[in-house]
Amino acid sequence: MKKHIILTRVLCILLSLVLVTALLWAAGRVLEPKYVTVSPEGSLTAEYYADAAEVSHDVVFIGDCEVYEAFIPAVLWTDFGISSCVRGSAQQLVWQSYAMLEDTLRYETPKVVVFNVLSLKYGTPQNEAFNRMTLDGMEWSSVKADAVRASMTEGETFLTYLLPALRFHSRLAELSDEDFRYAFAAKPTVSDGGYLMQTGVVPADPAVDNEALKPLLTDPSLPASAMEWLDRMTALCEERGITLILVKSPTNTWKYWWYDEWDAQVADYAAAHSLAYFNLIPDADKIGLDMSTDTYDGGIHLNVSGAEKLTRYFGHILTTTCDLPDRRTDDAYAPVWDRRANVYEQRKTERKSS
């Protein structure tokens, strides 16, 4: 009888824990940000999985806003027959880019990985909100667990990533219809293969002297911890037979300045590891960029017009430096990508008309 009572109590405790966990999970689905009409960049990580389930990619871009607002998979397909995707996110730090690479390799092995180097300037965790936009949408695995541990800022806890309700309970008073609509239903796709379209035009101010406004560089060396993660990325690509390309997006303003000292360090690293490195800042004129029409925020980031120019320019680099197949006549790729290209053009038309 005593054993029966103990067993009953243990089962009651276990059932209570399961019930509480289930309720916290359900609450988290409602409370966590949906990243549809507000901060849509927070949806980018999660959108990869449906994309990869439909078709494999020969080229994968990883990095921050300088990839997800700059390189357009639909244009690479239409102009070059390249199957590609962008695994970018807001202020994606280098260890998070490494996690994106590891996560990608759980599903496919691309021929080329393109990493934007701006995040190498960060050697420590930066911002919880950006951590969330990068990591919350990642499917759970040891890769995500490691990325969360590496990314947490002071005050963050691992448990709040497991059960988002513990973090987002303060949103209860600001919930919208969108939060309930997409709590347990699929969200609309906000990107085109990871490219987040911007159609607005806010010209760069020609009176702004970016050179004069750039912050003083107190230490010319990129953080050692960041370079160690780049070492790991390089080694992983080499191990899996992937061509790693380093790139710096062509935008360069005082807000996100790319210093000559950093550029030299990355160039030296690339040479030492037999990697291609393309600093596209000096190529802005060759690309055809016009910062009176090709930016939506005063020259900091590219709009769709500028991104199309950059994508075509970089597409030529990819096709001339890498052995990439043109898959436009491949029946396993063409129907999927032709449909995606049409969706991209339709989205662009609708955004511009609105």
Image: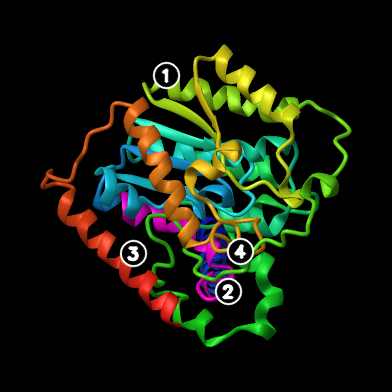
Label 2 sits on a secondary structure element that is loop
Q: Nearer the viewer, residue 258 or 63?
A: 258
Mark closest to the chain's N terminus, 3 or 4: 4
Residue topped by disc 4: 164
Mark closest to the chain's N terminus, 1 or 2: 2
Q: Which residues are magenta?
A: 29-52
Mark closest to the chain's N terminus, 1 or 4: 4
Which label number is shown at residue 38? 2
Amino acid residing under circle 2: Val
Left/right of residue 105 with respect to residue 177 in the rendered view: left
Residue topped by disc 1: 239
The residue shown at (36%, 51%) is 73
Label 4 sits on a secondary structure element that is loop
Q: Residue furthest top?
A: 272
Amino acid residing under circle 4: Pro
Task: Report if residue 286 lies within the magenta region.
Answer: no
Residue topped by disc 3: 344
Residue 20 in the image: x percent, y percent?
57, 69
Residue 335 in the image: x percent, y percent?
15, 56
Residue at mark 4 to residue at mark 2: CA–CA distance: 18 Å
Q: Nearer the viewer, mark 1 or mark 2?
A: 2
Which label number is shown at residue 71? none
